[in-house]
Image: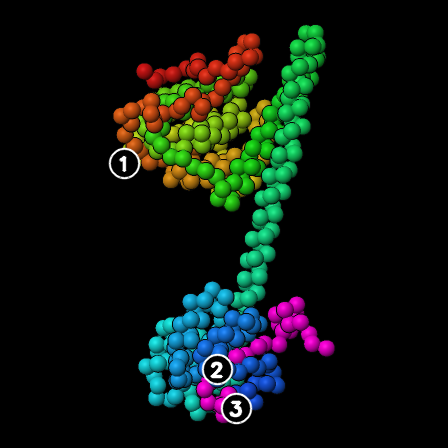
Amino acid sequence: MRVNQDILPLEDKQHHLLVVDDDRINRELLMHLFERDYHISTAGGGREALDMLHEDPTIDLVMLDIMMPNMSGLDVLGEIRETPATRNLPVILISAMANTRDVVNGLRLGANDYITKPVDVSVVVARVKTQLMVKRLLDERQETITELTKAEKLRSQLFRIASHDLKTPLSNIRMAEHLLRKMLPEDKSTNQTLDTIKLTVESMGSIISNFLDMVELQTGQMDIKLKPIEFKDVVYNVLTQYEIAANKKNIKLEMQETDGWVTADASRLIQVVSNLVSNAIKYSPENTTIVVSTRTENGRGFIYVADQGPGIPEDEREKLYTEFGKLSTRPTGGESSTGLGLWIVKHLTNAQRGEVGVDFPESGGATFWISLPECPPPSEENNFGGLGEADKPKVKSKDDEDTVPLRPKLSSHDS
């Protein structure tokens, strides 16, 4: 019974050698030398060898004579290396002792090794074994890469499917909570229950959004569109968006100087600054202040978010900006945390050609910052500069029918 070599483990597979030489005696000599341990095929010329390689993908190594009529071994080697299917196939050149120049040219063309005539049996056997071992290791590496690629693709698909399936029931719960507020009479206990439902849905929505962002960043599928963005637009919109959350903990949001323009993706920059401000609110004690400021220097624009929280223990600071980086400091109001917020900040900022960092003032707290390439204000803002209406966060108007852009009502030292 013939064993299918393709299904054997790489270490148990009988290797297949192709001997290419126009001299029949040389072909028979090499065939006799290796036929006990390997499956041997032979070709008497270059074109015949290339046809065999095209038809038989099981060949593991080629022993190739350089001096052949019609088509030299170097010409055959060139075609082997130019063909995707055989580009990485081990090739050992067979050369006359004095033919040094052809050997050098062959090695430059991509030959893996060479042997000289007359053949030294022990040298030939050792070199063939070495090249087959290297090929086996490379094949195993490629198999591992292929399996990891498949696993990563499957993981991404599962994340997307799971996230999509979770979004639908969350939307239904959000709608039910909204309807119940209208249907049920005003009652403190009922309102507390509905508030809990609302906060839970918002927390779950944030977790799903973070996981989707993580998948897009890891797979390189996130679409980044860079254009001139004014700091003031971003900071106004983000701080207004988080004003209610800050008020619940009696935290003051203070906006200092926000001059300057940078090259960034509008929605992703808002997301980055939102994550930083959200984190600052989450980890800040009640009755404290969060200060957001900007500056430009040496062709870079910086945004700073400074809090008066407990800071980060020195031995845990290396975990900042890492995936699922959990620290001993906990949210001060019982908020949830996925450990992905700062990791997303880092990678979104990097995707916009930016950098991230954090400082720890002696007075306490932490100052998280990002920097992006500075740019001059656009000459026609309405055409391509600043945030468009679609980029700005929206809130419901009183009648819950129309959406309106958020307007800042903040403590500000910005003139």
Are circles 1 and 3 on residues that touch, CB within 8 Å?
A: no
Q: Quadrant of the N terminus?
A: bottom right
Q: Which kind of residue does numbered mark 1 sit on?
A: Asn
Label annotation for residue 298: 1
Looking at the rendered image, the disc whose residue lies closer to the viewer, 1 or 3, is 3
Query: Is residue 20 a member of the stretch shown in magenta?
Result: yes
Identify the image quadrant of residue 387.
top left
Q: Residue at x 47, y 64 (%)?
A: 84
Q: Residue at x 55, y 12 (%)?
A: 401
Q: Which residue is mark 3?
A: 29
Name the side, left or right, on which 136 lies relative to 353.
right
Relative height, residue 265 to residue 40 (above, below): above
Relative height, residue 197 to residue 59 (above, below): above
Label annotation for residue 17: none
x then y, percent, for residue 80: 45, 71
x then y, percent, for residue 172: 66, 24
**Dot placed on the residue nearer the N-terminal end, 2 or 3:** 2
Identify the image quadrant of residue 223.
top left
Q: Residue at x 35, y 78 (%)?
A: 104
Looking at the rendered image, the disc whose residue lies closer to the viewer, 1 or 2, is 2
Identify the image quadrant of residue 32.
bottom right
Q: Which kind of residue does numbered mark 3 sit on?
A: Leu
The CA distance from mark 2 to mark 3 is 12 Å
Looking at the rendered image, the disc whose residue lies closer to the viewer, 2 or 3, is 2
**Dot placed on the residue nearer the N-terminal end, 1 or 3:** 3
Q: Secondary structure at mark 3?
A: helix
Q: Would you say residue 339 is visible in this rendering?
A: no
In the image, 153 versus 320, the foreground residue is 153
Q: Which residue is mark 2?
A: 20
The CA distance from mark 1 to mark 3 is 72 Å
What span is in magenta? 1-27
Query: Is residue 388 a member of the stretch shown in magenta?
Result: no
